[in-house]
Image: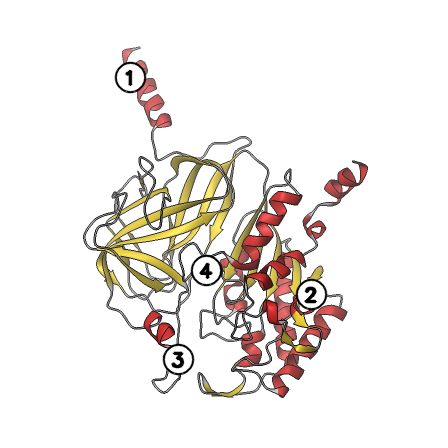
Amino acid sequence: MKRIAVFCAAAACLALSSPLSARSGAETWIEAHQSSPADYDFVIPASLNLPPEARQRLRDRPPVVGTLRMRVIVAIGGKAMRVRFSNEEGLAPLRIDAATIGLAGNGFDARPGTIRPLTFGGAKAATIPPGAPMLSDAIALPIDAPTELVVSVQLPDGLKLKPFGNAVMAMAEGDQTSAETLVASDTIIGRPLVSGVSILTEKPTQIVVALGDSLTDANRPVLMQDGGWLAKLRRRFVTERPSHSVSFLAAAIGGNRVLSTSWGKSALVRLDRDVLRIAHVSHVMMLEGINDIGNGGCSALLGCNPALDPADLINGYRQVIARARAAGVKVVMATLPPFAGANSFTAEREAQRAAINHWIRSSGEPDAIVDFDAALRDPADPSRLAVAFDSGDHLHPSEEGYAAMARAVDLSMFETSGRRRKRAAQ
């Protein structure tokens, strides 16, 4: 009896401490944050005329040794979480000597008293093989939604971060993973090691993944910057559908293309990894193809490539639709916004964009469409973004433009038939 009592006491202590094991019943692990891993097969030409602030941001830096801290947004709340780290684009093992998670405070600070150690199979340290992700053990850290977290890792061997990753992170010397405020820290732009955060929740939650390029990438080169149209859509959904829990995830990489790999693996290559692997996905929203168009032919940035045949891009879209439907996922296709005035614009490329958008609108092949082109274009010149919706580079929308994109989405497309009948009866 004494031995049984000791075992029961130990089991009770384990249940109250972290890491936490997943439980059965109504509780479910739901993906609440995603950042698509990416490498960049690209070098900025020295002759390219970039603004000084852009060249400073994209400057080459030595490998990060010591503490790397990332700030991430999670879309839903729950009682526990686990973190997905990625070495999927790495060519060598990635060693982590320590890792922590906490609620975000100001900047890269953690809120006092919230930092928790992360473990991997009960161990403090882990080595992620090249080409692989790694999940942390579950950790008890109840959160409301949406909220922001800081995840810190100690990197003993150095990690080279290429500067096109679109996420600003903090770095500091030594092991400061448990520090609420990093001492003598600096910032660096790159692709974050955190590729996902999942939450243990009792609330039934639908998952919608946005597959795209820089028009959708929610990684922020400026801390506290809004997460674009997807973040605004998430807030709109909370306001207009408060009883319907949806986790909107970004599977987007700046510069990405549908058909070819350069700025991250192509959408066709990464579809399974970044979208279809995620449990409970109901819809994928696809806004991608403008880089396939813009990178065809010759440019100062990318040299000369074959011109795009719109039929090839349409066949790429058809593959996304076929593979998603085979996994039980519906596909929402978005029209490509205008880009006249951008560095990559030509009349030939505008004709290609028009052909692509015509197919999206008229083919009937996607399960639904969102007409971002109509929402953003200048009525006086449909090849251009409206002035109020133009960030200044004539390709990426302004904050007002992202808000217009969020307003253009028909929220009812995400509702099941049963939920529609219930809403109609109310």
In the picture of the structure, the residue carrying the numbered disc 3 is: 50
- Mark 2: which amino acid? Asp
Mark nearer the N terminus (1 vs 4): 1
> Could you tell me if the residues under marks 1 and 4 are in contact, i.e. CB atoms within 8 Å?
no
Q: Residue furthest right?
A: 425
Left or right of 97 on screen, residue 372: right
Rendered residue at 39%/77% (across/down)? 51
Colour pattern: secondary structure
Q: Secondary structure at mark 2?
A: loop
Q: Nearer the viewer, residue 317 or 116?
A: 116
Question: Is disc 3 placed on a helix, strand or loop?
Answer: loop
Camera-side mark, 2 or 4: 2
**Alpha-carbon distance for marks 3 and 4?**
26 Å
Q: Residues within 10 Å of mark 3 (few under 14, many from 20)?
A: few
The type of residue carrying mark 3 is Leu
Provide the residue designation for mark 2. 371
* Mark carried by residue 36: 4
Q: Which mark is residue 136?
A: none
Q: Is residue 24 visible?
A: yes
- As shown in the figure, which amino acid type bears the numbered disc 1? Val
In front: label 1 or label 3: 3
Q: Which residue is mark 1?
A: 6
Which residue is outermost to the top?
A: 1
Task: Nearest to the eye among marks 1 and 4: give it.
Answer: 4
